Amino acid sequence: MLAATNASAATIEIDLATASPVPEGSSSVCAEGGWYTGDGSHRTIACYIPTGDWIQVVDQASDGYSAVALWQVTNANGAVVRQGRVYNASGYDTHRYKNKDFHDGSGYTLSIRACVGNWRGGDNPNIVLEACSAPKYTRT
Protein backbone atom coordinates (compact mmCIF):
# COMPACT_ATOMS: atom_id res chain seq x y z
CA MET A 1 0.00 0.00 0.00
CA LEU A 2 1.24 3.49 -0.72
CA ALA A 3 -0.27 5.33 2.21
CA ALA A 4 2.24 7.03 4.47
CA THR A 5 2.86 5.20 7.73
CA ASN A 6 5.16 5.73 10.66
CA ALA A 7 7.46 3.20 8.98
CA SER A 8 7.68 5.30 5.80
CA ALA A 9 10.47 7.64 6.80
CA ALA A 10 12.08 7.15 3.37
CA THR A 11 12.56 10.38 1.43
CA ILE A 12 10.19 10.79 -1.51
CA GLU A 13 12.10 10.62 -4.80
CA ILE A 14 10.54 12.90 -7.43
CA ASP A 15 11.65 12.33 -11.03
CA LEU A 16 10.80 13.48 -14.53
CA ALA A 17 10.74 10.56 -16.97
CA THR A 18 12.51 10.90 -20.32
CA ALA A 19 11.95 9.60 -23.86
CA SER A 20 15.22 7.72 -24.05
CA PRO A 21 16.83 5.40 -23.65
CA VAL A 22 13.95 3.04 -24.33
CA PRO A 23 14.62 0.10 -21.99
CA GLU A 24 14.86 -3.48 -23.13
CA GLY A 25 12.54 -6.09 -21.66
CA SER A 26 8.84 -6.15 -21.05
CA SER A 27 6.60 -4.96 -18.25
CA SER A 28 5.90 -7.37 -15.42
CA VAL A 29 3.13 -5.34 -13.79
CA CYS A 30 1.08 -2.35 -14.95
CA ALA A 31 -1.49 -0.18 -13.19
CA GLU A 32 -4.13 1.87 -15.00
CA GLY A 33 -5.78 4.90 -13.44
CA GLY A 34 -6.05 8.66 -13.41
CA TRP A 35 -9.83 8.79 -13.91
CA TYR A 36 -11.50 7.56 -17.09
CA THR A 37 -11.49 9.17 -20.51
CA GLY A 38 -14.69 9.57 -22.53
CA ASP A 39 -14.19 6.20 -24.23
CA GLY A 40 -13.84 4.36 -20.90
CA SER A 41 -10.06 3.93 -21.01
CA HIS A 42 -7.75 5.24 -18.32
CA ARG A 43 -5.73 8.44 -18.54
CA THR A 44 -2.48 6.95 -17.19
CA ILE A 45 -0.64 3.65 -17.40
CA ALA A 46 2.28 3.04 -15.01
CA CYS A 47 4.42 -0.06 -15.51
CA TYR A 48 7.45 -1.74 -13.97
CA ILE A 49 10.06 -3.27 -16.30
CA PRO A 50 12.26 -5.56 -14.17
CA THR A 51 15.16 -5.76 -16.66
CA GLY A 52 17.10 -2.76 -15.39
CA ASP A 53 14.41 -1.61 -12.91
CA TRP A 54 12.60 0.85 -15.18
CA ILE A 55 9.34 2.69 -14.53
CA GLN A 56 7.28 3.44 -17.65
CA VAL A 57 4.62 6.16 -17.58
CA VAL A 58 2.12 6.54 -20.43
CA ASP A 59 -0.12 9.60 -20.88
CA GLN A 60 -3.37 8.56 -22.57
CA ALA A 61 -5.40 11.76 -22.41
CA SER A 62 -5.04 15.32 -23.67
CA ASP A 63 -6.34 16.79 -20.42
CA GLY A 64 -3.69 19.20 -19.11
CA TYR A 65 -2.51 16.75 -16.43
CA SER A 66 0.81 14.97 -16.24
CA ALA A 67 0.73 11.17 -16.06
CA VAL A 68 2.36 9.95 -12.83
CA ALA A 69 3.62 6.63 -11.47
CA LEU A 70 3.44 6.53 -7.68
CA TRP A 71 5.69 3.75 -6.34
CA GLN A 72 6.94 2.32 -3.08
CA VAL A 73 9.41 -0.43 -2.08
CA THR A 74 8.92 -2.29 1.20
CA ASN A 75 11.14 -4.88 2.88
CA ALA A 76 10.07 -8.26 4.27
CA ASN A 77 8.88 -6.57 7.50
CA GLY A 78 6.63 -4.16 5.56
CA ALA A 79 8.82 -1.13 6.25
CA VAL A 80 9.08 1.42 3.44
CA VAL A 81 12.68 1.58 2.23
CA ARG A 82 12.13 3.77 -0.86
CA GLN A 83 9.21 5.66 -2.36
CA GLY A 84 8.64 8.16 -5.09
CA ARG A 85 6.88 9.57 -8.09
CA VAL A 86 7.80 9.50 -11.76
CA TYR A 87 6.14 12.17 -13.91
CA ASN A 88 5.50 12.12 -17.65
CA ALA A 89 5.05 15.81 -18.50
CA SER A 90 5.47 15.33 -22.26
CA GLY A 91 1.77 15.27 -23.08
CA TYR A 92 -0.82 13.06 -24.70
CA ASP A 93 0.18 9.76 -26.31
CA THR A 94 3.74 9.75 -24.95
CA HIS A 95 5.66 6.93 -23.29
CA ARG A 96 8.38 8.04 -20.88
CA TYR A 97 10.86 6.06 -18.74
CA LYS A 98 12.94 6.39 -15.57
CA ASN A 99 15.55 3.95 -14.29
CA LYS A 100 15.32 3.41 -10.52
CA ASP A 101 17.86 0.65 -9.61
CA PHE A 102 15.73 -0.97 -6.89
CA HIS A 103 16.99 -3.33 -4.15
CA ASP A 104 17.72 -6.83 -5.40
CA GLY A 105 17.11 -9.96 -3.41
CA SER A 106 14.28 -11.65 -1.66
CA GLY A 107 11.92 -9.84 0.58
CA TYR A 108 11.49 -6.57 -1.34
CA THR A 109 8.10 -5.70 -2.80
CA LEU A 110 7.34 -2.89 -5.24
CA SER A 111 3.88 -1.38 -5.39
CA ILE A 112 2.96 0.93 -8.25
CA ARG A 113 -0.08 3.11 -8.91
CA ALA A 114 -1.12 5.11 -11.98
CA CYS A 115 -2.14 8.69 -11.19
CA VAL A 116 -2.49 12.15 -12.67
CA GLY A 117 -0.90 15.31 -11.35
CA ASN A 118 0.95 18.47 -12.35
CA TRP A 119 4.70 18.56 -12.92
CA ARG A 120 4.83 22.39 -12.78
CA GLY A 121 8.36 22.45 -14.12
CA GLY A 122 9.54 20.52 -11.08
CA ASP A 123 8.57 23.36 -8.75
CA ASN A 124 6.25 21.75 -6.18
CA PRO A 125 4.80 18.98 -8.39
CA ASN A 126 1.59 17.39 -7.14
CA ILE A 127 -0.60 14.29 -7.46
CA VAL A 128 -4.39 14.00 -7.48
CA LEU A 129 -4.57 11.05 -5.06
CA GLU A 130 -8.29 10.43 -5.60
CA ALA A 131 -7.48 9.79 -9.27
CA CYS A 132 -4.91 7.05 -8.54
CA SER A 133 -5.44 3.41 -9.37
CA ALA A 134 -5.34 0.66 -6.81
CA PRO A 135 -1.77 -0.54 -6.27
CA LYS A 136 -0.25 -3.43 -8.20
CA TYR A 137 2.48 -5.48 -6.52
CA THR A 138 5.59 -7.35 -7.66
CA ARG A 139 9.01 -8.40 -6.37
CA THR A 140 12.04 -6.26 -7.25
Image (spheres, rainbow, N blue to C red):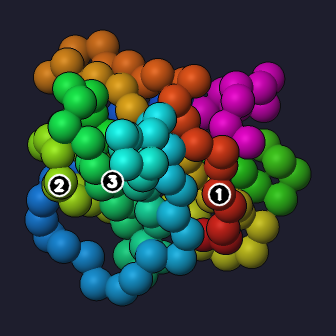
Residue type at mark 3 is Val
Mark 2 or mark 1: name the one nearer the start of the chain: 2
Which residue is the site of mark 1? 136
Marks 3 and 2 in Cβ contact (< 8 Å):
no
Q: Find residue 111 and report its horizontal and vertical position in percent.
A: 63, 53
Q: Mark on residue 70?
A: none
Asked if one can make out residue 60 in the rendered structure from this viewpoint, the answer is yes
Tell me the CA gap for discs 2 and 1. 22 Å
Asked if one can make out residue 71 in the rendered structure from this viewpoint, the answer is no
* Quadrant in which residue 21 is drawn: bottom left
Tell me the CA gap for discs 3 and 1. 14 Å
Tell me the magenta residue range.
1-10
Please name the residue shown 50% across and 44% down the image.
Answer: 33
Q: Nearer the viewer, residue 118 or 55?
A: 118
Of the 4 image quadrants, the one containing the N terminus is: top right
Which residue is the site of mark 3? 57
Residue type at mark 2 is Thr
Q: Is residue 13 above or below residue 72?
A: above
Q: Mark on residue 94?
A: 2
Of the 4 image quadrants, the one containing the C terminus is: bottom right
